[in-house]
Image (tube, grey):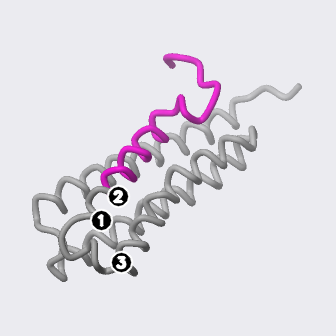
């Protein structure tokens, strides 16, 4: 692996999650979505939850706890994807914006899934003290 991970800010999945949250905040400030406070709040909270769960899980300094919070983060990514589908269907976002955001979320979900697999495998290969 590359650089040593000392804090959650060093994690690529957290960095991507923050970037997605920023994109969602910007998206929610434009068009019809900016005036639909319930939808705007819902997608923002779901997007925030991804990076929040990654950060919180990391801080427990326990791989099994971290995996649990990574699963929550992955679930929140699914919620964002669901919200994007709804926003596209009701005409709040157009196809190119949907495609761009959807692809970013899918990529992040896959990275989180791979990270979970890595941590689980790491736990099974640790030698007892």
Look at 52% across and 56% down and name the residue there: 73
Q: Position of residue 7 (x, y in %)?
A: 63, 30
| Front in this rendered view, residue 21 or 125 | 21
Q: As displayed, is residue 113 above or below residue 81? A: above
* Residue at the right extreme, as displayed: 129
Q: Position of residue 99 (x, y in %)?
A: 17, 58
Q: Which residues are magenta?
A: 1-24
| Tag 2 and tag 1, C-beta contact below 8 Å | yes
Q: Position of residue 30 (x, y in %)?
A: 21, 65
Q: Position of residue 125 (x, y in %)?
A: 69, 30
Q: Is tag 1's residue or tag 3's residue first in the polypeptide sequence?
A: 1
Under circle 1, the secondary element is loop
Measured in 3D between alpha carbons, the distance from the residue under mark 1 to the one under mark 3, in whole angstroms, is 9 Å
Measured in 3D between alpha carbons, the distance from the residue under mark 2 to the one under mark 3, in whole angstroms, is 12 Å
| Residue designated by label 3 | 39
Regarding residue 25, the answer to whether it shows in the image is: yes
Look at 35% across and 58% down and name the residue there: 25
Whether the magenta-drawn stretch holds residue 47 is answered as no
| Tag 2 and tag 3, C-beta contact below 8 Å | no
Instruction: Name the image quarter holding residue 16.
Output: top left
Image-based side of 20 in relation to 63, left or right: left
Q: Which mark is residue 25?
A: 2
Look at 33% across and 72% down and name the residue there: 83
Look at 40% across and 52% down and name the residue there: 109
Q: As displayed, is residue 82 above or below residue 108? A: below
Instruction: Name the image quarter holding residue 8.
Output: top right
| Residue designated by label 1 | 28
Q: As displayed, is residue 3 above or below residue 32? A: above
């Amino acid at each position: 692996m590359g650089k040593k991970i000392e804090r959650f800010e060093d994690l690529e999945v957290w960095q991507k999650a923050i970037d997605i949250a920023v994109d969602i905040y910007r998206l929610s400030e434009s068009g019809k979505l900016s005036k639909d406070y319930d939808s705007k709040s819902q997608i923002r909270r779901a997007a925030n939850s991804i990076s929040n769960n990654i950060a919180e899980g990391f801080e427990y300094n326990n791989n099994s706890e971290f995996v649990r919070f990574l699963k929550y983060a992955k679930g929140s990514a699914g919620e964002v994807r669901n919200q994007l589908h709804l926003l596209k269907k009701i005409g709040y976002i157009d196809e190119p914006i949907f495609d761009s955001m959807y692809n970013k979320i899918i990529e992040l979900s896959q990275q989180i899934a791979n990270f979970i697999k890595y941590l689980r495998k790491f736990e099974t290969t640790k030698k007892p003290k």
